[in-house]
Image: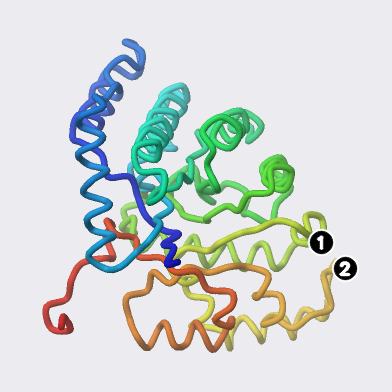
């Protein structure tokens, strides 16, 4: 069976129009504009299945479109409503094509909140909606503020819940409001920071069952491996961290294959091992544009 672990919600424009209305009113009119008809959702779910058939994918794990999750917006209730609306839309499409689609939810990671506030929706995704994983945004401020990195105990309530539920998190940032970056370059930067911060912390010691999948092949890490190896050699096991090489520690993560380059994929496989890599297409998504010069 061919399983694509990095797919995104294919939803009608009415869902995003509802998001625009909610944001324009700053949540004053509630969430009533976020409803989508069964017919619309079914038509767009069919589009997803057709695109899977074109490339031979048996099952796609579908998550919300990360760049649209608006984690830095205020008031925080809008972040919660929008995450819930996306999760509900995915659950409804999964129920229409249960043999072809599976759900990966979004936590309502409002930047001003304690992570404990995000956990009820995480539990709902797994226990009520039957999702198999969740997105984890390492920067809910979306490039604006300096929040604790993933090696900080700030994130421990999330790690504890993920471990309790026995599900993986796909580390994937959302939008970027920093004028120095696009959201695509922010993805890669945050993936790099995520890996390095976790490996320079006690996270995997304190949560040995934690499963973290790093999007887009791991940011810069597998491709700047010499620099990060040197950093580990200089550290000489600070703070009681595992006495392991950087490469050994790196293989605690999983990586998707959303790289779109033969050379990059080959290097990823050689660096972390093919056994730590999971097929991802990000289709539909920003990276999955057909290059006519390489198309058969």
* In this view, 200 is above or below 65: below
Where is residue 186 drawn, in percent x and y?
40, 59
* In this view, 73 is above or below 142: above
Q: Residue at x 60, y 53 (%)?
A: 168
Residue farthest to the top? 29
Query: What label does residue 205 carry, if any?
Result: 1
Where is residue 239 drawn, in percent x and y?
85, 66
Name the side, left or right, on which 295 lies relative to 65: left
The reply to whether the C-beta atoms of the residues labelled 2 and 1 are less than 8 Å apart is yes
Label 2 vs label 1: CA separation?
10 Å
Name the side, left or right, on which 258 lies relative to 247: left
Q: Quadrant of residue 25?
A: top left
Name the side, left or right, on which 285 lies relative to 85: left
Where is residue 183 drawn, in percent x and y?
34, 55
- The residue that label 2 is drawn on is 240
Q: Quadrant of the N terminus?
A: bottom left
Where is residue 167 drawn, in percent x and y?
63, 49
Q: Secondary structure at mark 2?
A: helix
Q: In this figure, which colouring scheme has been used for the structure? A: rainbow
Q: Quadrant of residue 209?
A: bottom right
Q: Secondary structure at mark 1?
A: helix
Q: Out of 234 and 296, give the one closest to the viewer.
A: 296
């Amino acid at each position: 069976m061919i399983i694509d672990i990095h797919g995104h919600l294919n939803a009608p424009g009415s869902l995003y129009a509802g998001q625009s209305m909610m944001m324009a009113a700053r949540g004053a009119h509630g969430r009533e504009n976020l409803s989508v008809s069964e017919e619309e959702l079914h038509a767009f779910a069919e589009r997803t299945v057709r695109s899977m058939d074109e490339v031979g994918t048996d099952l796609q794990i579908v998550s919300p479109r990360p760049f649209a999750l608006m984690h830095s917006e205020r008031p925080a209730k809008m972040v919660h409503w929008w995450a819930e609306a996306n999760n509900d839309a995915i659950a409804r499409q999964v129920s229409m094509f249960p043999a072809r689609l599976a759900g990966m939810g979004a936590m309502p990671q409002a930047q001003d909140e304690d992570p404990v506030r995000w956990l009820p929706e995480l539990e709902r995704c797994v226990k009520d909606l039957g999702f198999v994983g969740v997105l984890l945004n390492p920067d809910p401020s979306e490039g604006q503020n300096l929040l604790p990195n993933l090696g900080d105990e700030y994130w421990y309530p999330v790690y504890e819940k993920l471990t309790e539920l026995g599900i993986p998190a796909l580390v994937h940032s959302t939008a970027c409001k920093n004028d120095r970056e696009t959201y695509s370059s922010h993805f890669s930067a945050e993936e790099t920071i995520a890996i390095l911060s976790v490996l320079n912390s006690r996270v995997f010691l304190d949560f040995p069952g934690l499963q973290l999948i790093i999007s887009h092949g791991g940011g810069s890490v597998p491709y700047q491996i010499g620099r990060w190896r040197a950093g580990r050699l200089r550290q000489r096991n600070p703070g009681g961290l595992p006495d392991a090489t950087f490469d050994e520690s790196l293989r605690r993560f999983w990586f998707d294959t959303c790289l779109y380059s033969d050379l990059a994929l080959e290097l990823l496989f050689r660096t972390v091992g093919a056994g730590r890599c999971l097929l991802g297409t990000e289709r539909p998504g920003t990276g999955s544009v057909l290059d006519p010069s390489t198309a058969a």
